[in-house]
């Protein structure tokens, strides 16, 4: 083994030359027009690409989570430049390198949609149900609104979960329906077929 190969063997997966590196960025900032473009410009200027992103206005705050990819040097440049640029934009950021986990053949993707009266702890109850079943939540969004007819606060919760192939879907569906009846949740649990 050559010396450079020996040195590279000890590097974490995200640092090996020739491999695309991945960086997860979480950011919040006062909302204003053009802020998403400022972040996109910065990432492109570092020769990185946005692989995934979620952006949303929450109150008067802009929130963002994204995963950028690029060569090891490009991602290192982004890690170096971003904190100073973010500060100038009034943005609070967190950065973390990650690895591509690839496809999960032993997990079936399912979409869960729940509508219920909004109350403190409803999200905790739902996430606890899936944790007790050893089901990984890959994505979750929660929104609230006022029902037009009753003026009652309503919670709409959407999840994407990965269900282990060894788990009985029929049994899980029965347990989920029982859980939803107990909490008076209107919910669906459907496979993602795309």
Image (cartoon, grey):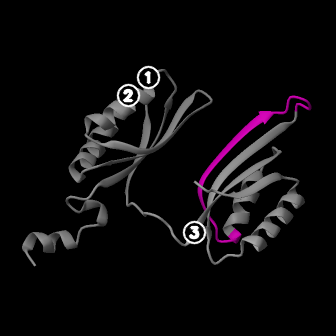
On screen, residue 30 above or below 126: above
Task: Give whichever of discs 3 and 1 has the lower sequence position.
Answer: 1
Magenta stretch contains residue 119: no
Magenta stretch contains residue 143: yes
The residue shown at (81%, 69%) is 175
Count neighbours of disc 3 (C-alpha within 10 A) and say few if under 14, some if 14 to 19, many if 20 or more: some
Q: Which mark is residue 34?
A: 1
Tell me if I can see residue 152 in this picture.
yes
The residue shown at (76%, 59%) is 125
Question: How far is mark 2 from mark 3, CA to CA?
Answer: 37 Å
The residue shown at (27%, 39%) is 81
**Looking at the rendering, which quadrant does residue 126 occupy?**
bottom right
Residue 148, percent from left and from top: 86, 28
Provide the residue span drawn in magenta.
Answer: 132-151
Q: Which mark is residue 38?
A: 2
Q: Which mark is residue 10?
A: none
């Amino acid at each position: 083994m050559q010396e450079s190969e020996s040195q590279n063997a000890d590097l974490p997966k995200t640092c090996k030359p020739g491999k695309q590196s991945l960086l997860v960025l979480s950011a919040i900032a006062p909302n204003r027009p053009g802020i998403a473009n400022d972040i996109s410009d910065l990432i492109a200027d570092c020769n990185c690409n946005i692989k995934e992103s979620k952006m949303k206005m929450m109150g008067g705050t802009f929130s963002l989570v994204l995963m950028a990819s690029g060569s090891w040097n490009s991602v290192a440049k982004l890690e170096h430049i971003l904190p100073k640029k973010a500060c100038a934009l009034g943005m609070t950021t967190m950065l973390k390198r990650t690895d591509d986990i690839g496809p999960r053949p032993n997990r079936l993707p399912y979409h869960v949609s729940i509508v219920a009266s909004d109350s403190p702890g409803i999200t905790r109850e739902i996430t606890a149900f899936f944790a007790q079943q050893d089901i990984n939540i890959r994505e979750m969004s929660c929104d609230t609104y006022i029902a037009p007819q009753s003026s009652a606060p309503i919670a709409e919760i959407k999840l994407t979960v990965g269900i282990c192939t060894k788990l009985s879907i029929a049994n899980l569906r029965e347990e989920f329906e029982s859980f939803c009846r107990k909490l008076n949740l209107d919910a669906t649990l459907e496979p993602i077929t795309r």
